[in-house]
Image (tube, rainbow, N blue to C red):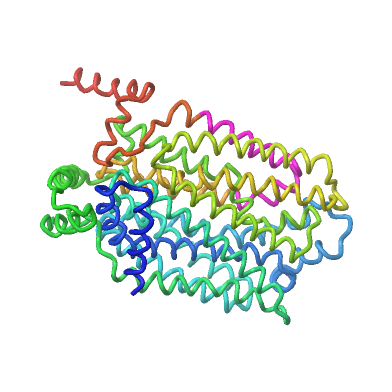
Amino acid sequence: MQKYVTKSYYINLTSFILPKNKRSELIITIYWLNLSKTRSQLHANCHRTLMSSCGVTSMEPFLKKFFPDVYRKMKEDAKISNYCKFDSQLLTSFTSSLYVAGLFATFLASSVTKAFGRKPSILAGGAAFLAGSALGGAALNVYMLIFGRILLGIGVGFANQSVPLYLSEMAPPRYRGAINNGFQFSIGIGALVANLINFGTEKIEGGWGWRISLAMAAVPASILTLGAIFLPETPNSLIQNSSDHDKAKTLLQRIRGTSDVQAELDDLIKASLVAKSINHPIKKIIQRKYRPQLVMAIAIPFFQQVTGINVIAFYAPILFRTIGIGESASLLSSVVTGVVGAGSTFISMLIVDKFGRRALFMVGGIQMFVSQMLVGGIMAAQLGDHGTVSKGYAYLVIFLICIYVAGFGWSWGPLGWLVPSEIYQLEIRSAGQSITVAVSFVFTFVVAQTFLSMLCHFKAGIFFFFGGWVVVMTAFVYFLLPETKNVPIEQMEKVWKEHWFWKRILGEEDDEIKIHH
C-alpha cells in the first residue's frame, strides 16, 4: 500500500514542477526507485541513529557508568579548563571505532559489490547494523559498547559503498542529483531523529535512557535488511555480472518510463565489456587517463571531513555544554541543528539539478567560512578556561552553528557523495567508490579521534582551523571541478577532456600513446 501512496504523492508533486511530457519518465522512475530510496533513507537513519551514541556521551548516567573519569572531571574538578573536560582517549575511541571498522569493511564491500552486485552489499550492511545496534543497547561494559560500534562500522562500510552506486545507476541523468541527494537528506533526517530520541530518553528516570538511544537503531536496521530483499538489481550490475541483456532492457524500460532505451543499453553493454577486461580496477584507476577521477576520489571526501561538520555531528551536545548550556538544553540545541541540516539538504535536492554542483559548492563554502570565523571569534572573546558565556552569546553561537550546518547541508554534505558517485566510468566505479568511502572513513576517524584533544589545546582556534580548510576546498572546486549536471555517466569522460586543466593531463597521455605507437 505504501508504494502506491508514494507514487500518488510524486504524481502530485511533479504536476507542479515538470511539463506534462516529462512527468511520465520521472513518475515511473521514482515509482521503481521508491523502494531503493526508502532503504537508503533507512540506512542513513540507521547511520545517524547510531550517531545517537554521540548524544549519549553528554548524558551523565552513561558517562558515570562507562567513562567515570570524564564524569568526575565534568562534575568535580573546577581546575579543568572548559575546553578540556571531555578530553578522553577512551571516549573518543568509543566514537571513532566505528570508522576503523568501516574502513576495512569498505574494501571487502568493493569485492562483493563488483562480484555479486549492489543488492548483496546492501543486505550485508543491514544485517551488520542490526547486530551492532542490539549489542550497543544491551552493553554491560565499555568493551561491549565498542564491539557494537565495530559491527555498526561494518554496516556503514557496506552501505556507503553500495547505496550511492545503486541510486546513481538507477536514476536518469536529469534527476540523478535530486535522487542521489536524497541519500544525504536521509542522513539529515536520521540525525534529527537521533537528536529527538536523545532529548526524550535523557529525561527517563533511572538513568537507563541511553540504552533506548543506542538500541533504537535496530528498528530501521531491521526494515533495511528485510526491505533490501525486494530490491531489483541495477541494469549496470545485471549486464556486468549476469550478461542478461533482456532483463536489463526490461528494467531500463520500467524505470525510464519508455521503450526507447536501446541507446542507453548499448552504452552499458559497451562499458561492461571494458570493465570485464580489467582484472585489477585499483591498478586501473591510478593510470593517467583516470587521474581526474582519482584526485576527486581522494580530495572530495577529505575536504568533506575537514569542513568540521563531524565536530557538530559527533560532539554538538558536548560543545554546547562547553559554552555553559545545560544537559537538556544542549540536546535540544542539537535537535535544532538537526532540523536545519535536514531542511537545507532537502532544498539542495530541489535545486541541485537546476543550478548545478559548482554553484552550491561555492555558496555553501562561503557560508561555512563566515559562520565559523564568527563562532571562533565569539568563543575566543567570551569563553575562557573557566566560567561560561552569557545566554545571549550562547544562543548566538547556536544560531551561527545553524548557519554553518545549513551551508554544509546544501553543499558539501550531499554533493560530497553525489559527485564522486557520478564521475566514474563503469570499469573503475567499484574501485573509485571504495577509495572515496575509505578516504572518508580515514579522515572521519582522524577528526573524531583528535577533536576533543584539539579542542583542549586549540580552544576557540579550532574553528579557525576548520575555516581555513573551507577556503582551500572552495578554491579547489572553483579551479578544478567541472560541472557534471545532466551529464550521463557513460559520457562523463568528455567533461574532463574539455576542462581547462584536466585536458592538459589527459592530452599528455594521448601524446604518450601516440609516441609509443
Residue 456 lies within the magenta run = yes
Q: Residue at x 45, y 34 (%)?
A: 358
Q: Return the x and y of residue 139 as percentages of the image width and height.
A: 59, 76
Residue 39 lies within the magenta run = no
Single out the residue that lies furthest toward the bottom: 206
Q: In the image, is residue 310 above or below residue 68?
A: above
Give the prevailing secondary structure in the magenta stretch: helix
Q: In the image, is residue 218 above or below residue 500?
A: below
* For residue 311, side relative to residue 385 (left or right): left
Q: Residue at x 78, y 58 (%)?
A: 325
- The one nearer the camera, 401 or 101, is 401
Q: Residue at x 65, y 64 (%)?
A: 55
- The one nearer the camera, 444 or 516, is 444
Q: Return the x and y of residue 266 as percentages of the image width and height.
A: 13, 44
Quarter of the image containing the C terminus?
A: top left
Q: Return the x and y of residue 205 as percentages of the image width and height.
A: 73, 81
Q: Return the x and y of residue 278 as percentages of the image width and height.
A: 21, 44
Q: Residue at x 42, y 56 (%)?
A: 160
Tag count: 0
* For residue 329, side relative to residue 409 (left or right): right
Range of residues picked out in magenta: 447-475
Quarter of the image containing the N terminus?
A: bottom left
Question: In which quarter of the view is residue 292 placed?
Answer: top left
